[in-house]
Image: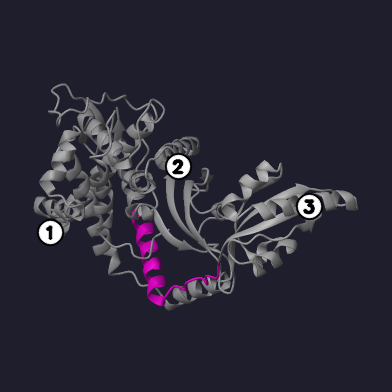
Amino acid sequence: MMHADDVPGRLARGAALAALLLVAALPLDVHAAPSRAVKAPPTDAPAVSIPPATSAAPRPLSESVAAIVNDEIISTYDLAQRMRLLIITSGIQPNQENLPQFQRQALISLIDESLQLHELRRVEKQQKISIIATDAEVREELTAMARENNMTADQFLGALKSQGIGPETLYQQVRAQMSWQRWIQGRYGSRLRIGEDQIKATETRLAAVASKPQYQISEVLIDANRAGGMPQALQGAQQLITQMQQGAPFPAVARQFSAAPTAAAGGDAGWVSPGELPPEVDAVLDGLRPGQLSPPIQVKEGVYIIYLRNKRAGAGATMVSLKQAAIPLKADASPADIEAARAKLMAVRADAKGCNDLESVASKAGVMAGDLGDAEIADLAPEFQQAAQTLNEGQISEPIRTKVGLHLVAVCGKRATGSGAMSRDQIENRLMGQQLSLIARRYMRDLRNSATIETR
């Protein structure tokens, strides 16, 4: 997915901005770095010793070769530096389990950048044009990033230096990303034309699902080819989920690990409707609540991690957030049992002030209670629909009989939020972004296939 407001050059600023936000707050243990797609290095790539994070480490005299890309050497020093940068920019604490994933990502990033700069130098020579960002342009980009966080470029680079990262490491990453984005946009952006039929088809599809819920999501896509295979992609995704559950920021992780075009925006895919993502993702989204992370979702090209930020009802629908207290009763329960359960629930209803204390009051009374989450009123069980429609926020229903028991339903939230229709320009921008992303992925695939890449 490509967020509608993605623009050229945002990749460079987004990736390095994460470093700016995190560098001062994170203790560094071991490692750093990544970027985009490449022929995945073998999982048994040489282990790299990460120097302790003191001041910017001098270039070691005994560095060796980590990889050779079209006769250009990537040293173990380069790899160690990039791994260290990756830790800072992702917010993930390294350990023995995820160290190989960091090393693989760092090596993939360096190989990608080497391929991109090699191709851009070839184009510059052939066409006698300037594409690769100059030192002054890279410095200007870093200055802009620093300014966004009330720092100077020197303060920013000084913060990196204090973490043992030389400025050339970030310069290389930003230069490659800026230059590649410039080339892709310049070569293909002006040539691409989104046809009226494509826009109409998208409008028709969006209209068809306008009454269904919409989801505001962030995404990470682990490319199976880059990860070394689907098992490695699944393992890597699970490790990232564990780290995010322990506090690693989703946007920082997405910028450094995601192969989706939304990586530049920290994984922000905006509002999506059913059918915009693979069906495997749609199936999981339906069961998530705002604020939840998905488990790893395997799709054809790799593994998704989805963070559901918000959910809204479709056009003409009302979304409610519900809690319940319930006493199980068989369908053929006796009138006496039903009346006893009703009396118990009415006592809970009398003591509870609303959603905030329904569960605690029910627990003290020996009654099961729980959160039913968000749902459209039309999707609720018929017995609950009337209560959801008529009750105001904070109110609790009288006992409701179903075939499985007797229930109190509390309305914790209610909103009628029609789906915001995308404008024609937004649709065109999104389609353009998707096309450019597809072109860039194919371009990189061809570069990898034609390159000589040797890992040591």
2 vs 3, front mark: 3
**Secondary structure type for disc 3:** helix
Front-lying residue, 39 or 330:
330
Q: Position of residue 35 (x, y in %)?
A: 30, 45
Give the position of the C terminus as an image quadrant: top left
CB atoms at circles 1 and 2 under 8 Å apart? Answer: no
Three-letter code, disc 3: Ala
User: Is residue 177 visible from the viewing direction of this image?
Assistant: yes
Between the residue at mark 1 and the residue at mark 2, the CA separation in whole angstroms equals 37 Å
The residue that appears at 39% across and 58% down in the rendered structure is 438
CB atoms at circles 1 and 3 under 8 Å apart? Answer: no
User: Is residue 302 visible from the viewing direction of this image?
Assistant: no
Locate residue 234 relative to residue 342 in the image: left or right.
Answer: left
- The residue carrying mark 3 is 343
Give the position of the N terminus as an image quadrant: bottom left
Q: Which residues are magenta?
A: 415-440
Residue 83 is covered by the magenta coloring: no
* Sequence-wise first label, 1 or 2: 1
The residue that appears at 68% across and 55% down in the rendered structure is 350
Up/down of 163 relative to 120, above or below:
above
Query: Badge 3, how many Cα within 10 Å: few under 14, some, many 20+?
Result: few
- The residue carrying mark 1 is 128
Three-letter code, disc 2: Ala
**Prevailing SS of the magenta stretch:** helix
Q: Position of residue 41 (x, y in %)?
A: 36, 34
Q: Position of residue 134 (x, y in %)?
A: 11, 52
Three-letter code, disc 1: Lys
Between the residue at mark 2 and the residue at mark 3, the CA separation in whole angstroms equals 57 Å
- The residue carrying mark 2 is 224
